[in-house]
Image (cartoon, grey):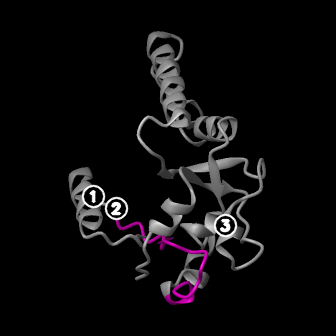
Amino acid sequence: SLEKRLEPLRWQFTNFTVCESPRSPPPSRSQLAMLLPQNNCTSVCNAVIAAPPNNIALRDTLEASLIKTRQVLQDPEMDGQYTVHWTGPPVLTRFAIHHSMTILYSHTFYPCSHQNRAVECKPKLFRNSSTTFAMHEWKMSWVGESLTNAMIKAARLQNNNKSMVVVQ
């Protein structure tokens, strides 16, 4: 697994998320190159968010999501049907861009695509990368696991202060 500390990212950027689409590698190996040029991201990943308490972009995302969810639940024609576009990455993307939240290249936290996981998703390939701080190995380890067990596992990782997290 990769074990890198996240403090350099937290010191460099007050708040950040990671671009999910389009997937492209940073233009250089410099840590400054992790920062995606403004408005080059069409969809952020709502699984990677770092922000101080009371962050306005996150507050606005939450408020917009709650308003839309309430509307859907009260609309008999919607019959409780849900779509990720009401509360997921599209909403966070809109407010992250509106509030100039730092958006990092996808390679910062998941350097390999779920489509190429068998070929390129090996921790040893990213161990010396200065622009990769964590990696998703796309092993679907959560399948069959209860939510409680997954939460306990995440809390243990956080408590161990292993800032470089490998998501399976």
Name the front one of labels 2 and 1: 1
Local crowd size for mark 3, using a 10 Å CA cut-off: few (<14), some (14–19), many (≥20): many
User: Contact (CB < 8 A) between labels 2 and 3?
Assistant: no
* Kind of residue at badge 3: Met
Question: Where is the N terminus found, in terms of image quarters?
Answer: bottom left
Q: Which residue position is annotated with label 2?
A: 142
Q: Which residue position is annotated with label 3?
A: 34
Picture coordinates of residue 51, whole percent (x, y): 48, 47
* Inter-mark Cα distance, 2 to 3: 28 Å
Left or right: where 46 falls relative to 35: left
Q: In this view, does 16 lie above or below 127?
A: above
Picture coordinates of residue 133, whole percent (x, y): 51, 72
**Residue pictured at 54% horizontal, 50% vertical:** 15
- Where does the magenta region start and end? 124-141
**Residue pictured at 66% horizontal, 67% vertical:** 34
Q: What element carries label 2?
A: loop
Mark toward the start of the polypeptide (2 vs 3): 3
* Inter-mark Cα distance, 2 to 1: 7 Å
* Inter-mark Cα distance, 1 to 3: 29 Å
Q: In this view, does 17 lie above or below 154?
A: above
Left or right: where 22 falls relative to 12: right
* Kind of residue at badge 2: Trp
Picture coordinates of residue 103, whole percent (x, y): 64, 53
Q: Which residue position is annotated with label 1?
A: 150
Q: In front: 100, or 107?
A: 100
Mark toward the start of the polypeptide (2 vs 1): 2
Q: In front: 15, or 84?
A: 15
Residue 125: say if magenta: yes
Q: Is mark 1 on a helix, strand or loop?
A: helix
